[in-house]
Amino acid sequence: LEAGVREERIVDLPLAGVDVELFQPVADPPARVALRQALGLADRPTCLFAGTVLARKRPHLLVPALAALGERGLDVQVVLAGPEQDKAYAERMRSEAARLGVTDRIVWYGFTRRVSELMQAADLLALPSEDEGIPGVVMEAMASGIPCVYTDISGARDAIDDGVNGTIIPADGSGLTEALARYFAEPAQCAGHGRAARAKAQEKFSNRVVLERYLRIFDNVCSHRLPGA
């Protein structure tokens, strides 16, 4: 608008689409227990991090958060699903986990094609990144019926309605422990936010909905083209 573009010529591009058939909520609690077993995970409340393990995504913040949750009597595990791109960074995480006594509650799952199953096995997704585009993993988690704890950076408020279908924490990563503690201490709220996340994913982010929005944009552009253009 400041550049003089007319408002009717500006379109709001949709977020990336998600396959809501592949990413679905787990059927019921017994199915989640069975899935954890099949994936080689302990049957305990689970926080999933899905993405490359490197400093920009700040999975290291989950290590002291996990220790703090344990001090509150919350027996939680963190599953890190993604390749260790920065080996030195990952080793520092391991050293910190050993120092804090939480090594046995961190699962280094590595690169995997079973992300949809891991999301069904988890209670929530945590992505405390300092910099992102609009991560598809957030929409995938929402479609899987689990809430996301995400930093207040690019795309966060386009995807998540804070306190309704997920939690947005400050961009510096502070508040991570409190957000996780609320969800794990109140499973009913966690499940409720997960259901709301699934509903929004179906309504706003499904591949079909996103495709239809792009088609409307193309139709609008074509209808405003000058003769011979």
Image: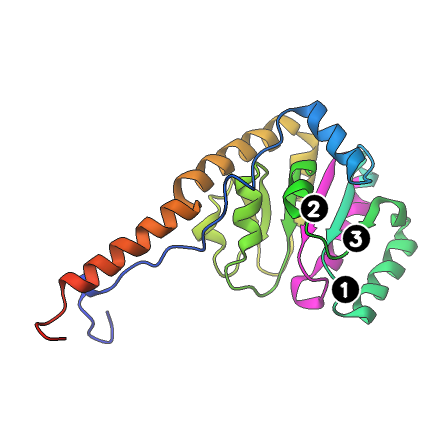
Mark 1 = which residue?
Answer: 84
Instruction: Tell me, yes or no, if residue 144 can be seen here.
Output: yes
Q: Which residue is mark 2?
A: 48
Q: How is the image coloured?
A: rainbow
Where are the magenta residues, as a range?
44-69
Do labels 2 and 3 touch, CB within 8 Å? no
Q: Residues within 10 Å of mark 1 (few under 14, many from 20)?
A: some
Residue 226's spot in the image, x, y percent?
10, 72
Does residue 227 appear to the left or right of 85 in the view shown?
left
Residue type, numbered disc 1? Glu
Q: Position of residue 198 (x, y in %)?
A: 50, 36
Residue at 36% x, 51% y is: 211
For the residue marked with disc 2, what is the amino acid? Leu
Is tag 2's residue or tag 3's residue first in the polypeptide sequence?
2
Pointer 3 residue: 63
Outermost residue toward the front?
228
The CA distance from mark 3 to mark 1 is 16 Å
Say how many tags the image has.
3
Q: Foreground residue, 52 or 59?
A: 52
